[in-house]
Amino acid sequence: MFQLGKTLVSEEIIEKDFVCNLSACKGACCVDG
């Protein structure tokens, strides 16, 4: 796990594919979830 600004990020995010609908959430799902 590493810190990106004020957010802790799991290293799994680098290894796993995920889908984020940026037009719907404006990136909030990437911060909240």
Image: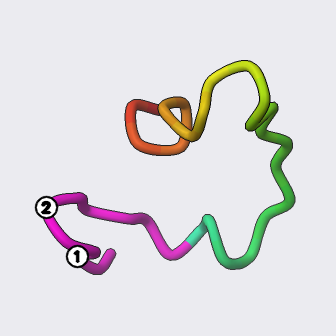
Rendering coords of residue 30 (x, y %): 53, 43
Q: Is mark 2 on a helix, strand or loop?
A: loop
For the residues labelled 1 and 2, say whether their Cβ atoms are less than 8 Å apart: yes
Q: Alpha-carbon neighbours of circle 1 within 10 Å: few (<14), some, or many (≥20)?
A: few
Return the residue at label 2: 6
Q: What residue type is labelled 2?
A: Lys
- Residue at (74, 76) in percent of width and height: 15
* 22 lies above or below 16: above
Rendering coords of residue 23 (x, y %): 78, 29
Q: Which of 27 and 9 is in front in this view?
A: 27
Left/right placement of residue 33 relative to residue 4 reads: right
- Residue at (66, 77) in percent of width and height: 14
* 13 lies above or below 1: above
Quadrant including the N terminus:
bottom left
Return the residue at label 1: 3
Q: Alpha-carbon neighbours of circle 2 within 10 Å: few (<14), some, or many (≥20)?
A: few
